[in-house]
Image (tube, rainbow, N blue to C red):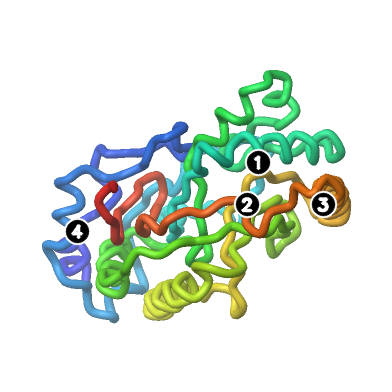
Amino acid sequence: MEALIASYGDASSESDSDDLSPHPGGKSTVGKDETESSFSLPPPPLSLLNPPNSSVSIDFLPAESAIRVRSFPHVEGNYALHVYIPVSLPSTAKKEIACFLKRVASAVPDLHLVEADVPVSILCKDEHKLEHALGREFHISLGRTVPIRVHQINSVVSLLRQKLQFQKRYWMDFSKWEVFVNDDCTRSFLSLEITTAGVAEITKQIHAVNDVYKLHNLPEFYKDPRPHISLLWALGDISNSLKGAVEGELKKLKAGACVQNRIFTSKFCGIECRIGNKAYKICSFPDE
């Protein structure tokens, strides 16, 4: 068993690493050598996916900010797995979205920009800071963020690529402001939801990711997924006050005849998988 594990290698031992908070306009990718090496071996046998005694001991994430709450406890030898569609806001929509977020933040304290741990109140002090901060990469989750063992990494990445290799381009319409709360009610999110174009395609991709998760005894995604990107977050369940602020701003926009059928449209550009602080390309399309 140990010899088999060794033959598949330790996917965390390479020197390549990525910042957990992508820079504005930047994309987190792995190096060419790492991408090619992930195809060099077929997935290991299922009996290898959960060996009873793994001697590998690896830290799964850098220390997080004190104001963040882990969704699962830190365990040596575990890595956090997240499968997602990267999304960048179009430049034409950033100004209007920034204005909307500022108005909501003025009514709800202690909101932070997702992945940045930066209070929106600080960004709002400069007219262009929040708009510039929205240049970072956001994501649509295709699976739950869950811990996996180091020996499962190659298998997970290989099977995701097999399941999702034949993807076509499609458009995603972000058309609804929505408030979400995580399962243990430790954080609330202000998000932009996809309700029309793109829902069917993303749902199929979620089912493919679920298939890979099931093979590795990982929990599946929500039964009725609602594809979205989260822009702001706050500690605890503040859904009532956040929804109230959002509805109040939408009423003002409606009164001024400024409400649109969609807030912005984005083209599907591929799927990535982040394991710990490394990102793997699952499928992608050349820039147009």
Q: State left or right for residue 201 relative to residue 49.
A: right
- What amino acid is at disc 3? Lys
Q: Nearer the viewer, residue 82 or 134?
A: 134
Which label lies toward us, 3 or 2? Answer: 3
Q: Residues within 10 Å of mark 1 (few under 14, many from 20)?
A: some
- What amino acid is at disc 2? Ile
Q: Nearer the viewer, residue 152 or 248?
A: 248
- Residue located at (46% from left, 73% from top): 206
Residue ID for mark 1? 97
In the depicted structure, whether residue 92 falls above or below residue 247: above
Q: Name the quarter where the N terminus is drawn.
A: bottom left
Residue ID for mark 4? 38
- Residue located at (64% from left, 31% from top): 118
Q: Secondary structure at mark 1?
A: helix
Q: State left or right for residue 140 relative to residue 269.
A: right
In the depicted structure, whether residue 112 falls above or below residue 151: above
Does label 4 or label 1 sit earlier along the sequence? Answer: 4
Q: State left or right for residue 145 relative to residue 18.
A: right
Residue ID for mark 2? 263
Q: State left or right for residue 82 relative to residue 51.
A: right
Query: Which residue in the rendered view is the most extreme toward the top?
Result: 126
Residue 71 location (% of width, % of height): 61, 56
- What amino acid is at disc 1? Ile
Residue 104 location (% of width, % of height): 79, 41
Does label 3 or label 4 sit earlier along the sequence? Answer: 4
Q: Secondary structure at mark 4?
A: loop
Q: Quadrant of residue 93?
A: top right
Circles 2 and 1, Cβ within 8 Å, touching? The answer is yes
> How many angstroms separate mark 2 from mark 4 (CA)?
38 Å
> How many angstroms separate mark 3 from mark 1 (CA)?
15 Å
Query: Which residue in the rendered view is the most extreme toward the front?
Result: 257
